[in-house]
Image (cartoon, helix red, strand yellow):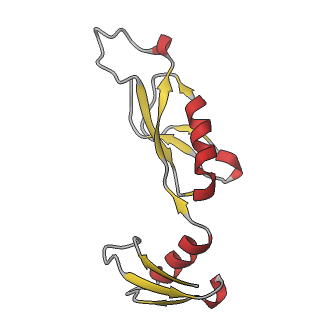
Amino acid sequence: MKSDLTCVTCPFSCSMEVVGQGPEDLVVVGNRCKRGLAYAKEELFAPKRLVTSTLRIVPEFLPDSEQWDLPRRLPCRTRSAFPRELIPELLEIIRTIEVVLPIKSGDLIRCDLLGTGVDLIATRSLP
């Protein structure tokens, strides 16, 4: 197997050529640091992504709209990278979540999503 990747773990953005059949015999050419090999192994054999979305705010808990100019949705993200093959299932779960205000940036919304150990957190504080 041969793949061309651009490493995104550091500012160098190395263009790498990766050859091998499995994680043990992978040969990476073009990386300027050790992180390139680790990135190539993860990207080819267990890809993960940071997932961002928005959550519905329970309407009855929104403050009086004349007093507050608040959004109707709360931005959120996974605390760490999430397995790429499970992202569609995760987004279905996120669509069902409603939050109650007040909430602070970094507050835990759901823990251990789909048994992966990855948490969902708020990324904005709202009164």
Based on the displayed image, in which of its 4 quarters is residue 29 positioned?
A: bottom left
Percent position of residue 75, x then y: 42, 36
Identify whether 73 is placed above or below 114: above
Q: Quadrant of the N terminus?
A: bottom right
Q: Quadrant of the C terminus?
A: top left
User: Residue shown at 62%/57% (left/top)?
Assistant: 85
Identify whether 23 is placed above or below 122: below
Percent position of residue 61, x then y: 48, 14
Q: From this viewpoint, is residue 112 visible?
A: no
Percent position of residue 93, x then y: 62, 37
User: Residue shown at 64%/82% (left/top)?
Assistant: 23
Based on the displayed image, in which of its 4 quarters is residue 84 positioned?
A: bottom right
User: Residue shown at 33%/11% (left/top)?
Assistant: 65
User: Residue shown at 31%/73% (left/top)?
Assistant: 11
Q: From this viewpoint, is residue 109 visible?
A: yes
Which residue is nearer to you in this view: 126 or 6? Answer: 6
Which residue is nearer to you in this view: 23 or 115? Answer: 23
Q: How many numbered dots are placed on residues in this image?
A: 0
Which residue is nearer to you in this view: 79 or 49? Answer: 49
Based on the displayed image, in which of its 4 quarters is residue 30 positioned?
A: bottom left
Q: Residue furthest front?
A: 1
Identify whether 3 is placed above or below 71: below
Percent position of residue 32, x then y: 37, 87
